[in-house]
Image (cartoon, grey):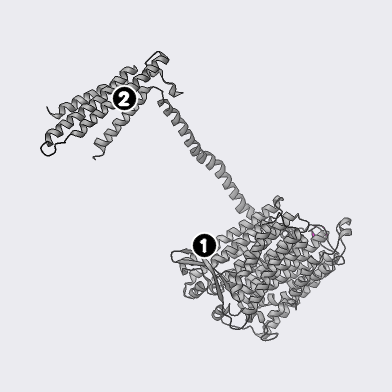
Amino acid sequence: MPINYYIFLSIALFCVGMAGVLTRRNAIIIFMCIELMLNSVNLLLVAFSKMHYAALKTTNPNAGIDAQIFVFFIMVVAAAEVSVGLAIIAMMYRNTHSVDVNFLNRLKH
Amino acid sequence: MTKIVYLVPLFPLIGFLLNGLLRKNLSKSLAGIIGSGVILASFVVSLVIFLDVRKDGFEPVIVNLFDFIHAGGLSISFAFQVDQLSVLFMLIITGVGFLIHVYSTSYMHDESSLHFARYFSFLNLFVFSMLLLVMGANYVIMFIGWEGVGLCSYLLIGYWFKNIDYGNAAKKAFIMNRIGDLGFLIAMFWMIRQFGSVNFSDVFSKAPDTSTAVLTGITLLLFLGATGKSAQIPLYTWLPDAMAGPTPVSALIHAATMVTAGIYMIARSNIMYTLSPVTQTVVAVIGLATAILAATIAIKQNDIKKVLAYSTVSQLGYMFLGLGVGAYTGAVFHVMTHAFFKALLFLGAGSVIHAIHGEQDIRKMGGLKKYLPITHITFLLACLAIAGIPPFSGFFSKDEILAAAYEKNPVYYIVGIAGAMMTAFYMFRLYATTFLGNFRGSSEQKHSVHESPAAITIPLIILAILAVVGGLVGIPHVMRPESHLLGEYLSPVFAASAKIQGTQEVHASTEWMLMIVSAALALIVVIFAWSRFSKKPELEDPQGFGKVLANKWYVDELYDAIIVRPLNAFAKFLNNVLEKSIIDWIVNGVGRLVQYGSRQIRLLQSGQVGGYVLLMVIGVVILFVIQLFLKKM
């Protein structure tokens, strides 16, 4: 499959995530959208890694390894982030009985 | 011995620092001792150097202290020049200055010790500046002293700074001097451009190869500086107002320092003046006009110090006449004799004012002869000297100038004689009104009139001796050949000019005639004034033409009308129109713009997380656009 397909899919996923972050007010949905953006980047990294591996495997057996390691890192970090983020959202719900981010605009005052 | 010349200005500087910094702790007697002692020390050092310099075949020595300014090809060092002219001036400044300091210890005794020490520190700084002025080996060092005496005159004229009029007189002196200083400064820049140096030796050696037009420009600008410092038309009006300061300060300004600066500067630059005849004519005419104008004003003044002030302006006019006709020795000679008798006159006037408790109006004096015997005698001798009665000192110096003026142009001589007659007239009007006749002050004053203490009378006596015999160092050749000691002493300084001018001696019989005519006329006027004013002093306010003279030809009013008021109106215009409506508008506008802008930008801080994210995304998109599209171009 040509690399372009992966790139377009990745852009589409990223834009969906971005649109979700910008338009939704529910904290959990915003959170999921952020995950979506992260995963679109992961997808792109893996796609490029595969492409370079296919092109360079005769000269360099380790070609494309770095990107795949990066992807694992991102997944680990995202998992940690999810646990922290969900804890924050739980606390937020406990205090305000809502997960609406616009409700929390006290930073303004 | 000339290596120790740096001590001469160092002592007054030390005195200034001690008195100035410790003025809260010094007692009056200690401040007086420090103030006078340092000047005496300078005088002694000057005398030692003088004994060295007066030997035959002495070559000018330049004592280099340190590099002062070094920029590009221009190098100005902080150097002193020791030659006949500078040493003579050092002696006059420190000698007469010392006597004035001693006098001041008594005259200023009523001041609180804080102000007493302040007074002495200023006085020392004044002497220091004047010494720098005459000792500098280039125009820049001279200019430092030149500005220094201007500053000190401001400080001392405004010594009683709580009186607004005195403060204004001080400001007037300072500003008038600044106008002249501008001319001096421009002349210096021109010299740097023309000669690449401001050292006397370089400038004077290159001057003969320079075009007359350039020299005329430089010398005229220098002369503008001299008119400010030495009170000549058109910048003379500050000097009579300088009477606001304490009387010894007037004596110091008028006799030993400050006003002689212009004479010294021109005498020092004599070669450049000799090479530009146009400037010489200007100097002579301005000097003569000032001499006459000031003399006519002095005739109708009633303030004892004002009369003396205008007589100073008038005598300075004679010195400039001398410089203008090439009689440099005569001008310097007159500086010297004038220093003696004018210091004496001022100190005598101070003694009179002191005796009758601050009264300065001669109409309220009279008959002081029997109360103030020493002051009276010394004052009379000084009057005879300034009036040009032989054999007192003023006769010789004034006669030398007038003889040289006759040689150049008989018209100068005739006008000069008229001025000399007026001098004799107003001096003896002053003398007779003050010391002869009956006492016209209040009875309280009459009871407490007393002769001044020794610290005042001793300087008077010393100066009186000098005023009487001071002229004997310059006896004209026709009286006794080879006895013009001052002329021989100064001849190396003016040698180059003398060579250019050539020596066209006036016929001996003509010179005798001139001398006899001037002495006889002066004597007649003296007798006339004496007999007229001793019996019936002039007490009424003058009428008609006399009123014009009493009001100083309305020159102050004229300056006020053509310079001060238009300037004030212009300043008011700038203040009200330009500043309020344009500059204020711009400044306030900047403030308003910032306030308005921030009020608008504040709306961006909504507190909505979505809004912030949107801004971030917009920012990222803009960065992408720049990275991908704009950067390639």
Residue in view at x 20 percent, y 28 percent: A44
The residue tagged 2 is A80
Q: Which residues are magenta?
A: B356-361
Query: Where, by quadrant of the figure, is residue B142 drawn?
Result: bottom right
Left or right: residue B610 compared with residue B554: left
Q: Residue at x 21, y 34 (%)?
A: A66
Say which quadrant the N terminus of chain B sits in. Answer: bottom right
Q: Is residue B543 above or below residue B397?
A: above
Residue pointed to by mark 1: B186
Measure how far apart labels 1 and 2 are at the Cα level.
80 Å
Image: B406 above or below B379: below
Q: Chain of mark 2?
A: A
**Image location (x, y in percent) of residue A13:** 23, 23
Instruction: Answer whether residue B419 is visible to the viewer in this image.
Output: no
Q: Amino acid at mark 1?
A: Ile
Q: Is B589 on the left-hand or right-hand side of B3? A: left
Q: Nearer the viewer, mark 1 or mark 2?
A: 2
Q: Are marks 1 and 2 in contact (CB under 8 Å)?
A: no
Q: Residue A23: image x %, image y %?
A: 31, 19
Residue at (57% x, 47% y) in the render: B570
Discs 1 and 2 lie in a common subunit: no
